[in-house]
Image (cartoon, grey):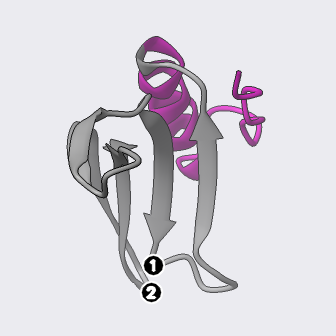
Amino acid sequence: MTLYPVADDVLFAPGGRVVIRTYGVAAPAESATGETGEERAVAYRTWVTGVRDQPRYWRWGHFEDARRGHRKVLEWLTGRGPQPQQVATV
């Protein structure tokens, strides 16, 4: 599995810190002979840890969606925007 970092941010709140991390994940494809071949398509995710009720995550279809989504998650957490909706993966 290969991780591709997109963006990382940390917010400091009265209850502790909140970490927002967006990255792409690609798992190597296995051929019929069991050898690991070229990388599969990349799946992008934004994870938020440190929020009291539960960890939250969003999935994005493409790199640009992940970049915009990360920014929207930051705006939502800081009270400057609505909760972001996931972009449907193709």
Image height of 56 relative to 14, above or below: above
Residue 22 location in percent, x, y?
Answer: 37, 44
Of residues 19 and 60, the one nearer the viewer is 60
Residue 5 location in percent, x, y?
Answer: 21, 40
Left or right of 80 on screen, residue 18: left
Find the residue positioned furthest to the top. 64
Task: Please say if the residues under marks 1 and 2 sit with CB atoms less than 8 Å apart.
Answer: yes
* Residue 25 tag number: none
Q: CA distance from mark 1 to mark 2?
A: 9 Å
Task: Residue under label 2, please give it.
Answer: 15
Of residues 81 and 65, the one nearer the viewer is 65
Left or right of 77 on screen, residue 67: left
Report the residue at 65% width, 82% height from top.
54
* Residue 50 tag number: 1
Residue 80 location in percent, x, y?
Answer: 61, 34
What span is colored magenta in the figure?
A: 64-90
Image height of 24 relative to 49, above or below: above
Q: Mark 2 falls on what kind of element?
A: loop
The amino acid pointed to by label 2 is Gly
